[in-house]
Image (spheres, rainbow, N blue to C red):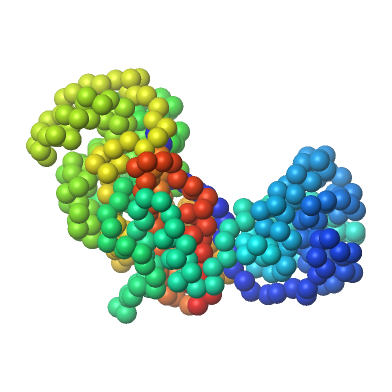
Amino acid sequence: MRIAGPNPGFLFALLLTLPPFSPADEPASPPRGTPLEAAARAVADHISAKPKGFAELFDSAFLAAVPPDRLRDIFRQLHEQGGRVVAVTLTSRESDTQGRFAFEYEKKLRSTVTLTVAPTEPHLIVGLFFGPPVPAYDTFESLVEEMKTLSGRVSFRTERLGEEGRSLAELNPDEVLAIGSTFKIYILGALIEDRQAWEAVIRLDADLMSLPSGTLQSWPAGSPVTIHTLAAQMISLSDNTATDHLLHHSGRERVERIMKEMGNLHAGRSTPFLSTLEMFKLKSDESLRTNYLAADVAGKRDLLAGAVKARPRSAVGAITSPRAIDTLEWFASAAELCRAMDWLRRKNDPAALSILAINPGLDVPAERFSYTGFKGGSEPGVLNLTFLIQSNNGEWFAVSGGWNDPERSLDEARFAGLIQGAIDLIGRR
């Protein structure tokens, strides 16, 4: 089992279309534009079934780190996935020698390519990074239609926030699903509402050490850590030990109340509000889980304080397939998570908003958006990606997508591509 926040995929924006170039299986046209742009077109030409000519394009130090055979495999794989590149678009320029491009493929896919060339002639490539090809969506309607083909259940909503807030696109927006580590935004909300001193120090407690994701579970008990550091670890790295310490610090019942205040109409389904370690223990012990699910709220609290607490962390087993995701989890709909992100926006706590923005989740283009806040979550059969973004013209948006399937694991990259598509469409409005 993984209670974590995924960071899958990359997104891009379309700003400046470069001059057209020859298909990969025809002779390349003479380089035009800046050396950076010429290098981008040359890379696109190499995405073919038979790529060659690396020595004329890449710096020798680059080829020593990434040998030609490895490059051929990468270019062939990209060609197999998307076909030849049909358009190259400059999306951002860091300098004369470094920039980011969008490659569009003939199979209606797009990918982000970050490229760096040497500052001196012949301006060979010294840095190259490919984001995975993702579907290109022209409308919200086509994106939603693709979501409808997913197995299991999906809840999705994209909305513009503010006084004139409205939905831009949605699919089952009120469907309540398991959300994995996205629940951690409710603990962040409790820290804001209770006006916790971000610089206050608490010490790591051996009884609150959880399991990965994260790294704090390996730190020595007694280590002093600020609330700000714990919150940053909880949101940006989805650190479970940081999460459980903050839940203990704020108080379980306080977080349950905040969950309602942040717009969750089904907070009762997540009551008692479980720590990550409690969830691990319950998911891995069928007898304990059965007793827990059969109990009322008071009985559940008694079990958490007794049998669940007593079960050693070392007894928790790996979970590799969906388990009790409809009954034992943290729950919210896409509409509720959009309300939660809007609540965080309106509270306007600078520390909390900066923490939410440490890990943007996807590669949201800075040339279109001035702020990106993100929290996601996943475990077998559960995936959620939720964003708070502000466009450069000052408009605020929330995007939330959840996908549950109790029968099988999920294609995270495919779902990330859909959410990337939604953000891309907002940026192109």
Say whether residue 384 is left or right of residue 311: right
Residue 341 x %, y %: 34, 61
| Residue 348, quarter of picture | bottom left
Q: Say which residue appears at 37% left-offset and 50% top-offset.
A: 152
Nearer to the camera, 155 or 146: 146
Task: State whether residue 354 appears in this view.
Answer: no
Say whether residue 333 is left or right of residue 267: right
| Residue 121, quarter of picture | bottom right
Task: State whether residue 2 appears in this view.
Answer: yes
Q: Is residue 287 above or below residue 392?
A: above
Q: Is residue 203 above or below residue 363?
A: above
Say whether residue 348 is left or right of residue 29: left
- Quick one: quadrant of the N terminus? top left
Q: Say which residue appears at 25% left-offset and 21% top-offset.
A: 311
Nearer to the camera, 42 or 372: 42
Q: Say which residue appears at 44% left-offset and 58% top-offset.
A: 149
Q: Say which residue appears at 83% left-offset and 43% top-offset.
A: 68
Q: How many marks?
A: 0
Residue 319 x %, y %: 39, 30
Q: Is residue 10 above or below residue 222?
A: below
Nearer to the camera, 203 or 155: 155
Residue 180 x %, y %: 35, 45
Residue at the bottom extreme? 164
Nearer to the camera, 123 or 166: 166
Q: Is residue 354 above or below residue 210?
A: below
